[in-house]
Image (cartoon, rainbow, N blue to C red):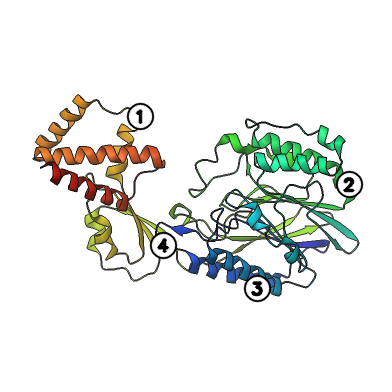
């Protein structure tokens, strides 16, 4: 049963990552399927406000198809919402703020607010039943965005405000930038009955999923206490739906972004802001067009079964002690939508030499040991040693073990070099 003191209804979502592909697999069909469900659910929930808290696109220069998909989504969503409802979109770290804000004035005329900059004023104000709600926007606060915020104060002849915000150099942390901005928003809270924040950042203590970039790091963490005083904080940046407090939530991505996310339920949040109680939060789960499955086993085990007919995206992790060559092509017959193949043999190789590469003498001894142990010729043993070095190098550069297709490409180049040498 819904609260009797209900004021505002909000849909909170983030991290659409339109234009994302998984290796060579285009996810456009999957994303369109999820967006259509969002529109359908939004029509039934009839919110006063929809917040999209950043990472609309997967890259700062999105493809034409991704931009077209976003435009169509905005049009469909606008038609599905009540006439008085508003939509707020802010950029995340994957987005180009200028591209997000393209034609912002035109969109605003139909209740879609594309806010790409950090402002001292609310992005929009909602009014309902005599209650006024300020909706504040805090896009991903880069050094450039912080500088522009200070510059805008100067241009508006607000020297006092300008003087009270330090000019942080390149060593200024995300926490410092966000703290300084929010500190200058807080005095304006008293002008409104309700204060809502849409923000794109990593809040300390939040749980990371596999698809959350390894470069988030502790240095970018923002203390949750910085957002005290807001009645609801709609966070974007992390892909797992989670609460950091009763009034502070990550909606997570509406669909899986990696095979490690395959078991997480995906969707968005329905939020009811009430007069005398904490926000009421209801997760709204969405169905995926195809599941993301990670399958582990030996090459023999995974090729022994009958061909799978399901359409799921599959990542195979081979547990064989030694590398299996041309595994991808063989496994494609078993898994029609195979996306990638990881081999623990290569991962062990990379882990063993990532930080302490053996000397040339040690490499010769290792090659000789391999030759004697497995009955290999000197050329075959050398071939394996070079592949191991490549796996180690790729691990250092990519921050993850090399995929099957990369190893296969390198091995073909290596084979050509060995033939020329012979």
418 vs 89, left or right, is left
State the residue at coordinates (32%, 42%).
347
* Residue assigned mark 4: 25
Above-or-below relation of 229 to 1: above
**Alpha carbon separation for disc pair 4 and 1:** 33 Å
* Residue assigned mark 2: 190
Query: Where does residue 262 sit, x and y in percent of width and height?
Result: 46, 57
State the residue at coordinates (40%, 59%).
293
Residue 225 seen anywhere in this rendered image of the structure: no
Q: Earlier in the sequence, mark 3 or mark 4?
A: 4
* Residue assigned mark 3: 76
Query: Where does residue 44 sit, x and y in percent of width and height?
Result: 69, 73
Q: Earlier in the sequence, mark 4 or mark 1?
A: 4
**Alpha carbon separation for disc pair 3 and 4:** 26 Å
Q: Earlier in the sequence, mark 3 or mark 1?
A: 3
Residue 23 seen anywhere in this rendered image of the structure: yes
289 vs 219, left or right, is left
Q: Earlier in the sequence, mark 2 or mark 4?
A: 4
Q: Earlier in the sequence, mark 2 or mark 3?
A: 3
**Alpha carbon separation for disc pair 2 and 3:** 36 Å
* SS label for mark 2: helix
Contact between marks 2 and 4 (CB within 8 A): the answer is no
Q: Quadrant of the C terminus?
A: top left
Query: Where does residue 421 sit, x and y in percent of width and height?
Result: 13, 41
* Residue assigned mark 1: 355
Query: Where does residue 186 sit, x and y in percent of width and height?
Result: 82, 42
Above-or-below relation of 162 to 362: below
Q: Earlier in the sequence, mark 1 or mark 2?
A: 2
Contact between marks 3 and 4 (CB within 8 A): the answer is no
């Amino acid at each position: 049963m819904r609260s009797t003191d209900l004021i505002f209804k909000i849909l909170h979502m983030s991290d659409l990552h339109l234009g994302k592909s998984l290796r060579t697999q285009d996810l456009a069909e999957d994303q369109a399927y999820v967006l259509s469900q969002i529109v359908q659910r939004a029509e039934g929930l009839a919110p006063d406000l929809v917040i999209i808290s950043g990472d609309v696109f997967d890259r700062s220069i999105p493809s034409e198809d991704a931009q077209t998909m976003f435009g169509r989504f905005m049009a469909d969503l606008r038609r599905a919402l009540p006439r008085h409802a508003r939509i707020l979109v802010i950029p995340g770290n994957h987005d180009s703020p200028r591209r997000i804000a393209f034609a912002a004035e035109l969109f605003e005329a139909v209740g879609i607010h594309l806010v790409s900059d950090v402002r001292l004023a609310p992005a929009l104000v909602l009014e309902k039943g005599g209650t006024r709600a300020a909706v504040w926007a805090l896009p991903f606060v880069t050094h450039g965005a912080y500088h522009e915020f200070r510059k805008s104060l100067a241009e508006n002849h607000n020297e006092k405000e300008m003087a009270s915000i330090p000019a942080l150099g390149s060593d200024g942390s995300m926490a410092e930038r966000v703290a300084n901005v929010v500190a200058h928003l807080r005095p304006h809270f008293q002008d409104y009955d309700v204060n809502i924040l849409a923000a794109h950042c990593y809040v300390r203590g939040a749980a990371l999923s596999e698809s959350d970039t390894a470069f988030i790091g502790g240095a970018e963490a923002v203390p949750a206490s910085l957002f005290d005083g807001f009645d609801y904080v709609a966070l974007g940046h992390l892909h797992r739906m989670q609460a950091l407090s009763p009034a502070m939530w990550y909606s997570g991505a509406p669909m899986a972004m990696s095979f490690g996310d395959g078991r997480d339920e995906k969707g968005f949040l329905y939020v009811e802001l009430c007069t005398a109680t904490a926000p009421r939060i209801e997760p709204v789960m969405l169905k995926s067009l195809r599941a993301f499955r990670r399958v582990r086993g030996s090459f023999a085990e995974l090729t022994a079964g009958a061909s799978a007919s399901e359409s799921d995206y599959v990542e195979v992790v081979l547990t064989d002690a030694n590398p299996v060559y041309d595994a991808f092509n063989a496994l494609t017959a078993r898994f029609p939508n195979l996306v990638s193949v990881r081999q623990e043999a290569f991962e062990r190789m990379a882990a063993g030499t990532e930080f302490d590469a053996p000397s040339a003498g040690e490499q010769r001894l290792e090659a000789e040991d391999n030759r004697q142990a497995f009955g290999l010729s000197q050329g075959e043993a050398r071939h394996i040693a070079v592949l191991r070095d490549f796996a180690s190098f790729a691990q250092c550069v990519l921050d993850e073990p090399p995929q099957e297709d990369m190893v296969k490409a390198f091995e073909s180049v290596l084979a050509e070099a060995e033939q020329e040498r012979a």
